[in-house]
């Protein structure tokens, strides 16, 4: 079953769950979180031996978009107690693999996680939703990196020292004969008085 829009947001539903069970999942996460995909699945960990899958639990799994934490999570839900029994945050560079249409894997916080879905349709819904998240995260990361990228290096232009100012001799002032005599008289007066330049 496809995701439905309600007043609070997007809430995916699964044909494997009853209408009441789908409603319980929706009510658990409204209004600050959205259910992007939901199904019935088995949770496996490749731990303690990374070459052997160990079944952890079977139940309802939901892909959650948490607006408060600005992140995405996989939650296993106990429908009877309306509680989350397992939570795994999906990191930005998540590499989500689908070796089989019904069996998906990814590197979890502590070990490799395997999800064995009961329905190929629901498994495909999870795959498409997670691929959409990883594509958006990749574009967001590229945009942030582009904004933080330093400007391209340009050729270094060495500054030249300023050119020295040309020395221009002051024009020689030519005095007329009358002006020369007047100047000589003034110099004689100064010498008599003891005034020097």
Image: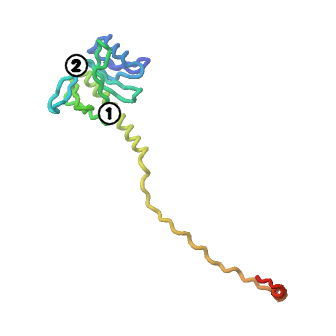
Q: Position of residue 66 (x, y in %)?
A: 38, 26
Q: Secondary structure at mark 1?
A: loop
Question: Which residue is at 39% across, 28% downward?
Answer: 69
Is disc 1 surrounded by few (<14), some (14 to 19) or many (20+) residues within 10 Å? some
Q: Position of residue 3 (x, y in %)?
A: 35, 20
Question: Which residue is at 33% across, 16% downward?
Answer: 25
Question: Which residue is at 23% across, 29% downward?
Answer: 113
Mark drawn on residue 65: none
For label 2, the residue is 58
Res. 176 visible in picture: no
Q: Pick the residue in front: 132 or 71.
A: 71
Q: Is residue 96 above or below residue 166?
A: above
> Image check: 51 left or right of 86?
left
Is disc 2 surrounded by few (<14), some (14 to 19) or many (20+) residues within 10 Å? some
Res. 129 visible in picture: yes
Q: Pick the residue in front: 122 or 195.
A: 195
Q: Position of residue 149 (x, y in %)?
A: 41, 47
Distance of label 2 from label 1 (alpha carbons): 23 Å
Q: Earlier in the sequence, mark 2 or mark 1?
A: 2
Question: Which residue is at 14% across, 30% downward?
Answer: 52
Q: Position of residue 4 (x, y in %)?
A: 37, 18
> Image check: 33 left or right of 97?
right
For label 1, the residue is 91
Q: Residue furthest front?
A: 194
Q: Secondary structure at mark 2?
A: strand
Tell me the quarter of the picture where residue 46 sits: top left
Tell me the quarter of the picture where residue 81 sits: top left
């Amino acid at each position: 079953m496809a995701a439905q829009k309600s007043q609070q947001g997007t809430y995916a539903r699964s044909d494997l769950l009853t209408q009441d069970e789908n409603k319980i999942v929706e009510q658990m996460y409204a209004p600050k979180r959205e259910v992007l995909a939901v199904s019935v699945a088995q949770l496996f960990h490749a731990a303690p031996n990374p070459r052997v899958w160990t079944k952890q639990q079977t139940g309802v799994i939901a892909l959650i978009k948490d607006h408060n934490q600005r992140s995405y999570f996989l939650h296993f839900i106990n429908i009877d107690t309306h509680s989350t029994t397992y939570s795994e945050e999906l990191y930005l560079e998540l590499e989500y693999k689908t070796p089989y249409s019904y069996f998906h894997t990814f590197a979890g916080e502590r070990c490799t996680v395997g999800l064995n879905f009961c329905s190929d349709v629901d498994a495909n819904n999870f795959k498409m939703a997670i691929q959409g998240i990883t594509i958006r995260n990749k574009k967001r990361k590229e945009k942030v990196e582009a904004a933080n990228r330093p400007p391209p290096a340009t050729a270094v232009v060495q500054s030249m020292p300023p050119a020295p100012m040309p020395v221009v001799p002051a024009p020689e002032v030519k005095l007329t004969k009358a002006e020369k005599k007047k100047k000589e008289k003034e110099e004689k007066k100064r010498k008599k008085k003891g005034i020097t330049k």
